[in-house]
Image: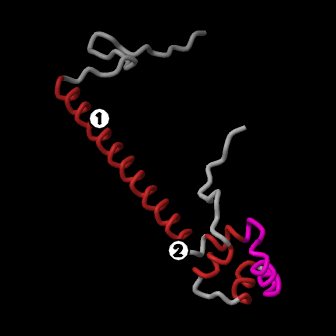
């Protein structure tokens, strides 16, 4: 079975640590963000445990989650810049090769029809 690439961390900080890092720590605001009631958030905080999906949603709102997203974005940009530079260099190299070959001579194509003053195109005659 092929493993899916995931940016999600395997280990998450404690729920109280993540909530302490949020700008709005009120259970009502957190519950509104997660689509649950404030009472549910209070229950999770008391138990220091929440469903993984909720923990991940909160993680991406913390400085650690935002830092991970920022690092991923920077790495993708650098990767695409490198790919762009490599393709540009290959394109320039191919243009130089074409110019070199064109400067040597005009040889035509292998499947180009032979045409000169001796050879004439076949005429179509109606046979009766």
Observer-nearest of 64 and 90: 64
Mark 2 highlights which residue?
63
- Magenta stretch contains residue 31: no
Mark 1 highlights which residue?
94
- Nearer-N-terminus badge (2/1): 2
Mark 2 touching mark 1, by CB under 8 A? no
Observer-nearest of 34 and 107: 34
Q: Secondary structure at mark 2?
A: helix
Horizontally, residue 100 falls left or right of residue 76, namely left
Q: Give the position of the N terminus as an image quadrant.
A: top right
Q: Which residues are magenta?
A: 36-54
Residue located 36% across and 49% down the image: 82
Q: Nearer the viewer, mark 2 or mark 1?
A: 2
The part of the image, by quadrant, that contains residue 89 is: top left
Q: Position of residue 14 (x, y in %)?
A: 66, 71
Residue 128 position (above or below residue 5): above
Residue located 67% across and 67% down the image: 56
- Dominant SS type (magenta): helix
Q: Position of residue 124 (x, y in %)?
A: 49, 16
Q: Position of residue 11 (x, y in %)?
A: 64, 60
Q: Residue furthest left?
A: 103
Residue located 49% across and 68% down the image: 67
Residue located 41% across and 52% down the image: 80
Observer-nearest of 28 and 20: 20
């Amino acid at each position: 079975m092929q493993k899916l690439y995931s940016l999600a961390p395997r280990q998450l900080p404690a729920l109280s640590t993540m909530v302490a890092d949020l700008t709005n720590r009120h259970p009502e605001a957190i519950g509104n963000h997660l689509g649950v009631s404030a009472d549910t958030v209070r229950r999770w905080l008391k138990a220091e445990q929440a469903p993984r999906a909720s923990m991940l949603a909160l993680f991406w709102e913390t400085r650690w989650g935002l830092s991970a997203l920022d690092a991923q974005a920077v790495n993708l940009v650098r990767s695409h810049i490198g790919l762009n530079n490599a393709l540009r260099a290959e394109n320039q190299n191919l243009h130089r090769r074409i110019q070199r070959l064109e400067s040597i001579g005009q040889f035509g194509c292998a499947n180009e029809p032979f045409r000169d003053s001796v050879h004439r195109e076949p005429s179509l005659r109606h046979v009766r």
